[in-house]
Image: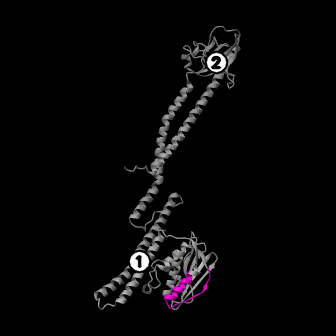
Amino acid sequence: MAEKRKLSIRARLTLIFVLAIAVILIFTGIALVNLVHQSLLGQASNQIDEVMVQTQTRFATATKPIYRMVVLSTQGDIVVQVTNSQGTKVWAASSAIENAPVLAHPYPDAAAGSGLGVRFIRNTKTNPTLAELSNGQVASIITKRGPGLVFGFVYGGPIQHSVRVLLASLLISFPLLLLMSGGLIWLGIGLALAPVEAIRRRVDAIAAQDLTQRVPVTGGDDEIARMARTVNEMLDRLEAASRFQQEFVSNASHELRSPLTTLLATTERATGDPEGANWPEAAEVIMREGRRLDGIIADLFWLARHDEDHLDSERVEVDFDDLLYEEASRVRSISELSVDTSAVQPTRVMGDPTMFKRMIRNVVDNAMRYAQSELRFDSHFDGEDAVVVVSDDGDGIDVSDSARFFERFSRADSARSRRSGGTGLGLAIVSEIALRHGGSARFVEVANGSRIELLVRRDGERLDTPPATT
């Protein structure tokens, strides 16, 4: 089943705004019709009161009783009918309803100004006239013939007609307003989204061609300008990641090619002349290069899992002093170097023991490659940080340029590092482990040899902004 195609953002925004305007117009139209209707009713009520007062005055000022039917003039849309108090006989009526029988009876109504309400009399004789009447009012009247009732009505349905005209106007104008609004909103949203579409096309072209290009940033600090700057920052990271990936692949290929070349050359020479080959020497070369390959692959695997944040880690108490003592014992057993552990103090932190052990071992192995006769270990606390220091009495390094040694595949001396088994990844792993535990790794200036200082937070928590490596 084909996936249902969704509307574009422009179309959805236009639809949402048009629906919102439609709801507003509907409520506005209802309120307007109700307001006009109430206004017309108020005006009609005032007109009825005025005509009824005039009728009352006329009968009250009559000099003699009038016993015949009196025809009154129709004033605008208002008609009146005067009956006796029993409502059985018509005494007077406007010309528009002069032939009509009694049309209504009064009933007590406290809400009415006169205290009386109007109840129409519906029958075959009154129905034709009642069809033209609305909004009736009644009041008592005193005449020379005695007490009576005067009824006032709106004649001809002008209120309903006005309301119907207004409704028709609204029903015609509202769709036109919605159509015009929709068109203007469509154009406005198109203009507002035009820079976004331009950025999208630009990014699409950049992704397909060259990551060194950037999106033009307009002036100001509006949403479009901020998005353009954010996109450029993302492109900076993508360019850096792409460059890093290319360099990483190139360096990894180079590192793997070197031991493989040595292995192939050694085996080809040995198999080419089996009887004259020095097999113990060949076996030693194969084992050494095999271990080197294994180390490179292990380091690459660790860094790959670290970059993907797939490393399994735990948080337990770890004693750096115990790790340093273990390394000192290992160094003494595999080399002629002496190890000074007199400065090692109890230093317990929270973190991953496997990572910490790898970190310490990488630092010690690096120091062993350059040491001439001695290594010195130190561990202590400095505020909230645990400090581990590993020193050697080698030739030393330029500390001002030492930050690059913590980059991947970087060495102080490429030829010597390869001979001693270095991969150029050990210190990079040390730096990553320290950062994961809220610390840093750096070389410290000393008079003789070199010294690496590791900082790790006591609680092992990673900082949002890790310390800079110097």
Considering only vertical position in the picture, is 91 above or below 351? Answer: above
Q: Is residue 24 magenta?
A: no
Task: Report x, y in % for residue 30.
Answer: 56, 35
Q: Which residues are magenta?
A: 323-346
Image quadrant assignment for residue 261: bottom left
Image quadrant assignment for residue 24: top right
Q: Nearer the viewer, residue 376 or 395?
A: 376
In this figure, which residue is indicated by the disc labeled 2? 151
Considering only vertical position in the picture, is 366 above or below 105? Answer: below
Task: Report x, y in % for residue 441.
Answer: 54, 78
Q: Nearer the viewer, mark 1 or mark 2?
A: 1
Q: Are marks 1 and 2 in contact (CB under 8 Å)?
A: no
Q: Residue at x 39, y 87 (%)?
A: 284
Q: Residue at x 50, y 91 (%)?
A: 336
Q: Which amino acid is tagged 2?
A: Phe
Image quadrant assignment for residue 318: bottom right
At label 2, counting other C-alpha atoms closer than 10 Å, the crowd grade (few under 14, some 14-19, many 20 or more) is: many
Disc assigned to residue 251:
1
Considering only vertical position in the picture, is 92 above or below 113? Answer: above
Q: Is residue 325 magenta?
A: yes
Please report whichever mark, 1 or 2, sits nearer to the chain's N-terminal start.
Answer: 2
Disc 1 is placed on an element classified as helix
At label 1, counting other C-alpha atoms closer than 10 Å, the crowd grade (few under 14, some 14-19, many 20 or more) is: some
Q: Nearer the viewer, residue 287 or 440?
A: 287
Q: Nearer the viewer, residue 207 or 296?
A: 296
Q: Which amino acid is tagged 1?
A: Asn
Q: Label 1 to label 2, Cα distance in Å?
A: 107 Å
